[in-house]
Image: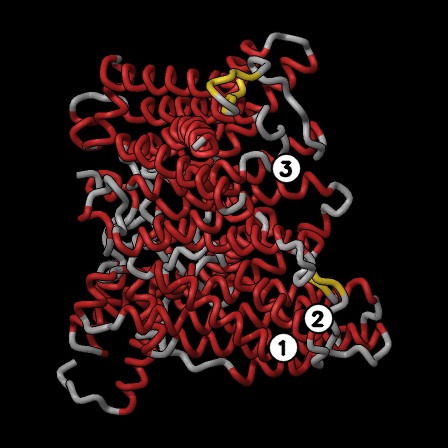
C-alpha cells in the first residue's frame, strides 16, 4: 500500500485494472482453425452460404458498432457506406473489367472515404442532429441511385453481373473459399477492434462517448479521434460491402432501405451496443432467428422488432452484457471464501458488476469503491486511491458492458436539459 | 410568372402538411425528449384506416379523415406504451438514443404488420374534394390541395388554442418547459406523456390522410414524410413550435421551387445539401437554443 513506485507487477496490475487486456490472438486463431473445418464436415451448401451471410453481417455490425456504440456518434447512414463499398467494387469489375481482387481494396477505400465525408459535417452536432444528417446522407445516396436512369448504376434494379472472387472454382468450393475468407477477415477485424479499444486510442473514444467535456479537459482531441474511428469503421464497412457485392454478384439500392437498417439496428442492440463481441453475437443470433422464421417472412420483422423492444426493456446491455454478467456472478460464487488480495480484486469487480445497473451514482467513480471493505482494500493496495477508483469504474463498466450507466443520462437529463 | 405562382402554391400546400406532420415530432421531442421515428408510420396507419373506411365501406372521405386521425392517435398511444414508457427514467441507458432506436423499430414493425394485413400493393384513395380551381391564366389548384391547406390551418389553429388555453395543453407546455417544476406543481407527467403521443398520432394521421390521395397508401408511405419531418424539425431547432411552422413553409417552398426549376428528381438531394450547409452554419436550427446545440 505504501509502495508507490510502479514495479513491474504493479504495472501489470494497473494494466489489468484499466482492462488493457492483451488481444486474444492465440485463442482466436485456434477458434478460427476449428471453425474452418465446418464446411468440410457439414457438407450442406445452404448452411455454408448462410454462415457466410452471418459473417458478412457481423462485419457490417462490427463496423457500425464502432461509430454508434464505441464513440457514440449517432451514425444512421452506415448502410449507405456499406453500399458505397459494394457499388464501387461492383462498378469497377463491370465497367472497367477489373478483377474482383483488385476492385475489392478500392471498394474498401471508397467506404472509408465516404464515411469520413458523411461524418465530417456532423461531428460538431449534438446526437439527434447528427443522426438526421447521416440518415439524410444515406437517403440521398439511395434516392440518387434509384433515380439514376442512365444505366450506370442500374437504377432501382441494382447492379448485376459483379465478378466474384473465386469465379473459377466450382460452386461448392466457391462457397467454402468465401466462408474461409470471411471467417479470417471477421476474426482479423475483431482482433483489430479489440486491440484498438484496449489501447489509449480506444479508451479515448469510450471516454468521449461518456463525457465529451471531461475528455476534452483531459486533452483528448475529439476531432482526430472521431475521424480516425470513422475512417476505420468506413474501411470495415467498405470491406463488408465489397464482399457482399462479389459474393452475391450484385447489389441493389433496397439494401439501404429502412428494413435492412432495422435489421442491423436489431443485431447491434440485441448483441450488445458498444462491445467487441456483441455485434458478432447479435448478427448470428438474429440471422438464426430469421432462418427459423423463414416460412413466415412477414412475421419475421414483427418478431425481431418485439425481440429488440424486450431486450431494450429488460437487458439494455444485450446478450453480451447478459453473458458477462452471469460470468461475473459465477466468478464471485467460485471465489467465495478465498481471502487473497488477488481474488479480492477480482471479486470487487464482480460484485461491482451486478450492482452497477441498480446503483444510481456515476459508474465512472462509484461501484468499485462502494461494495465492501475487503475489495476496496484490494483496490487501494494496488494503486494510489484516485486513479484506482476511476479505473475500477472503467473495469466494472467494461465487464458489465453497461455502456450508459453514468450520471448524465436519462432520468436526470429529462429534467435538466429542459431549461 | 405563372410557373412561379404554381410552384409557390404547391410549396405552401406542402408546407402546411409538413407543419402538422412535424408538429407531432416537435411536441413529442419537447415533452418526452424522444425523436419519434414512428411519426411517419402514424400517417401510414391513418391512411390505411381511411382507405378501409372509405373504399371498403363506402363512407364519405371526411369520415375517413376522422377515422384515420383517431386510428393514428390510438397507434400513438400504443407506441408510447410499448416503446417509450419502458425506457423513461432508466439510469442504465442513454434515453435519447434508445428511444430513437425503439421508435424506429416500432415504425418498421408497423409497416411489416400492415403488409401482413393488407399486402404490399399500393392502394388508391379518393380525395376529399374532386376537381380543380382555376385561379388565373393557366394557374390551377386541385380542390384537394385547397382542402389540405384549409384542414392544415384549422389543425394548427386548434393546436395553438389547445396549447395556450386548455388544461391538457397547458400541462403539455409545462412539462416541455420545465419538467421538474411541472411535476412539483402537480402536473401528472405520466398522463401528459401519453396524451402528447396521442396528439402526435392525431396530427400524423391527419397528415397521412391528407397526403394519401396525392401519393398512394402503401406500407412504406411513412418513410418519405418522416424524412421530411426530420428535416423540418432539425432546421427548426428540435422542440421549437414557432420554428417548426417557419421551417415547414421554408422547406415546402424550397422543395417546390427546386422541383419546378431544376427537376423533381433533384428536390431531395438539393434540399439535403442546403440543410447540410445550414447545419454547419447554425448547428442548433433556426429557433433552437444555442446552449443545447453542441457538446
Q: Secondary structure at mark 3?
A: helix
Q: Are marks 1 and 2 in contact (CB under 8 Å)?
A: yes
> Residue A385, relative to residue B222: is it above or below?
below
Q: Secondary structure at mark 1?
A: helix
Q: Residue A234 in the image: x percent, y percent?
A: 49, 69
Q: Is residue B227 left or right of residue B172?
A: right
Relative depth, front residue between A76 and B22: B22
Res. B80 in view: no
Give the residue pinned by disc 3.
B112
> Residue A271, relative to residue A416: is it above or below?
below
Q: Residue B83 in the image: x percent, y percent?
A: 46, 36
At 45% from the left and 66% from the top, the residue drawn is: A66
At 35% from the left and 45% from the top, the residue drawn is: B95
For residue A246, which numbered disc appears in the image?
2
Alpha carbon separation for disc pair 1 and 2: 9 Å
Relative depth, front residue between A381 and B163: B163
Farthest bottom residue in view: A8
Q: Residue B96 in the image: x percent, y percent?
A: 35, 45
For residue A104, which numbered disc appears in the image?
1
- Which tag is nearer the camera, tag 2 or tag 3? 2
Instruction: Please tell me if label 1 and label 3 are on a single chain.
Output: no
Mark 1 is surrounded, within 10 Å at the Cα level, by few (under 14), some (14 to 19) or many (20 or more) other residues, namely: many
The mark that comes first in sequence, 1 or 2, is 1
Q: Chain of mark 2?
A: A
Mark 3 is surrounded, within 10 Å at the Cα level, by few (under 14), some (14 to 19) or many (20 or more) other residues, namely: many
Alpha carbon separation for disc pair 1 and 3: 34 Å
In the rendered view of the protein, which quadrant contains the N terminus of chain A? Answer: bottom left
Res. B137 in view: yes
Amino acid at each position: 500500500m505504501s509502495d508507490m513506485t510502479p514495479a513491474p507487477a504493479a504495472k501489470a496490475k494497473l494494466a489489468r485494472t484499466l482492462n488493457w487486456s492483451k488481444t486474444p490472438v492465440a485463442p482466436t486463431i485456434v477458434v478460427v482453425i476449428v471453425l474452418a473445418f465446418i464446411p468440410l464436415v457439414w457438407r450442406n451448401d445452404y448452411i455454408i452460404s448462410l454462415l457466410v451471410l452471418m459473417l458478412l453481417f457481423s462485419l457490417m455490425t462490427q463496423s457500425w458498432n464502432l461509430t454508434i456504440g464505441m464513440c457514440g456518434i449517432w451514425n444512421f447512414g452506415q448502410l449507405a457506406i456499406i453500399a458505397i463499398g459494394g457499388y464501387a467494387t461492383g462498378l469497377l469489375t463491370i465497367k472497367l473489367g477489373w478483377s474482383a481482387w483488385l476492385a475489392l481494396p478500392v471498394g474498401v477505400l471508397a467506404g472509408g472515404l465516404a464515411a469520413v465525408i458523411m461524418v465530417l459535417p456532423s461531428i460538431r452536432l449534438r446526437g439527434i442532429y447528427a443522426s438526421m444528417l447521416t440518415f439524410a446522407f444515406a437517403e440521398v445516396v439511395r434516392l440518387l441511385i434509384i433515380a439514376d436512369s442512365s444505366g450506370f448504376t442500374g437504377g432501382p434494379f441494382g447492379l448485376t453481373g459483379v465478378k466474384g472472387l473465386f469465379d473459377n472454382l466450382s460452386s461448392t468450393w466457391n462457397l467454402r473459399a468465401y466462408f474461409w475468407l470471411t471467417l479470417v477477415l471477421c476474426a482479423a477485424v475483431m482482433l483489430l477492434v479489440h486491440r484498438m479499444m484496449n489501447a489509449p486510442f480506444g479508451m479515448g473514444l469510450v471516454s468521449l462517448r461518456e463525457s465529451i467535456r471531461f475528455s476534452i479537459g483531459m486533452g483528448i482531441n475529439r476531432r482526430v479521434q472521431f475521424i480516425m474511428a470513422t475512417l476505420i469503421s468506413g474501411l470495415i464497412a467498405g470491406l463488408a460491402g465489397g464482399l457482399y457485392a462479389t459474393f452475391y454478384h450484385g447489389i441493389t439500392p433496397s439494401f439501404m432501405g429502412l428494413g435492412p437498417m432495422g435489421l442491423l439496428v436489431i443485431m447491434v442492440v440485441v448483441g450488445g451496443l458498444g462491445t467487441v463481441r456483441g455485434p458478432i453475437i447479435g448478427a448470428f443470433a438474429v440471422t438464426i432467428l430469421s432462418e427459423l422464421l423463414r416460412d413466415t417472412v412477414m412475421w419475421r420483422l414483427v418478431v425481431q422488432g418485439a425481440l429488440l423492444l424486450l431486450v431494450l426493456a429488460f437487458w439494455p446491455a444485450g446478450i453480451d452484457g447478459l453473458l458477462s454478467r452471469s460470468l461475473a456472478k459465477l466468478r464471485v460464487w467460485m471465489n467465495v471464501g478465498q481471502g487473497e488480495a488477488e481474488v479480492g480484486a477480482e471479486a470487487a469487480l464482480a460484485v461491482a458488476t451486478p450492482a452497477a445497473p441498480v446503483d444510481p451514482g456515476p459508474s465512472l467513480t462509484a461501484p468499485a469503491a462502494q461494495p465492501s471493505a475487503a475489495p476496496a482494500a484490494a483496490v487501494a493496495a494496488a494503486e494510489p486511491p484516485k486513479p484506482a477508483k476511476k479505473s475500477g469504474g472503467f473495469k466494472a463498466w467494461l465487464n458489465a458492458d453497461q455502456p450508459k450507466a453514468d450520471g448524465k443520462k436519462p432520468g436526470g437529463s429529462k429534467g435538466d436539459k429542459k431549461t | 410568372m405563372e410557373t412561379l405562382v404554381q410552384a409557390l402554391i404547391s410549396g405552401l400546400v406542402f408546407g402546411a402538411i409538413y407543419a402538422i406532420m412535424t408538429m407531432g415530432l416537435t411536441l413529442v421531442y419537447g415533452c418526452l425528449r424522444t425523436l419519434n421515428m414512428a411519426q411517419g408510420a402514424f400517417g401510414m396507419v391513418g391512411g390505411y384506416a381511411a382507405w378501409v373506411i372509405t373504399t371498403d365501406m363506402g363512407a364519405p372521405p371526411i369520415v375517413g379523415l376522422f377515422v384515420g386521425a383517431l386510428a393514428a392517435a390510438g397507434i400513438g398511444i400504443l407506441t408510447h406504451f410499448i416503446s417509450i414508457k419502458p425506457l423513461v427514467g432508466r439510469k442504465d441507458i442513454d434515453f435519447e438514443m434508445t428511444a430513437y432506436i425503439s421508435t424506429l423499430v416500432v415504425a418498421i414493425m408497423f409497416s411489416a404488420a400492415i403488409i401482413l394485413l393488407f399486402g404490399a400493393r399500393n392502394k388508391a384513395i379518393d380525395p376529399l374534394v374532386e376537381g380543380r380551381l382555376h385561379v388565373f391564366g393557366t394557374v390551377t389548384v386541385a380542390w384537394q390541395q385547397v382542402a389540405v391547406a384549409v384542414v392544415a390551418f384549422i389543425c394548427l389553429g386548434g393546436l395553438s388554442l389547445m396549447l395556450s388555453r386548455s388544461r391538457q395543453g397547458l400541462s403539455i407546455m409545462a412539462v416541455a418547459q420545465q419538467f421538474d417544476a411541472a411535476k412539483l406543481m402537480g402536473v401528472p407527467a405520466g398522463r401528459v406523456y401519453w396524451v402528447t403521443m396521442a396528439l402526435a398520432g392525431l396530427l400524423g394521421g391527419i397528415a397521412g390522410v391528407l397526403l394519401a390521395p396525392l401519393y398512394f397508401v402503401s406500407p412504406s408511405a411513412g418513410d418519405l414524410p418522416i424524412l421530411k419531418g426530420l428535416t423540418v424539425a432539425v432546421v427548426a431547432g428540435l422542440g421549437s413550435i414557432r420554428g417548426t411552422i417557419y421551417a415547414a413553409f421554408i422547406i415546402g417552398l424550397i422543395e417546390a421551387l427546386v422541383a419546378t426549376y431544376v427537376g423533381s428528381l433533384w428536390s431531395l438531394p438539393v434540399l439535403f445539401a442546403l440543410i447540410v450547409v445550414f447545419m454547419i452554419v447554425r448547428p442548433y436550427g433556426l429557433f433552437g437554443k444555442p446552449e443545447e446545440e453542441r457538446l
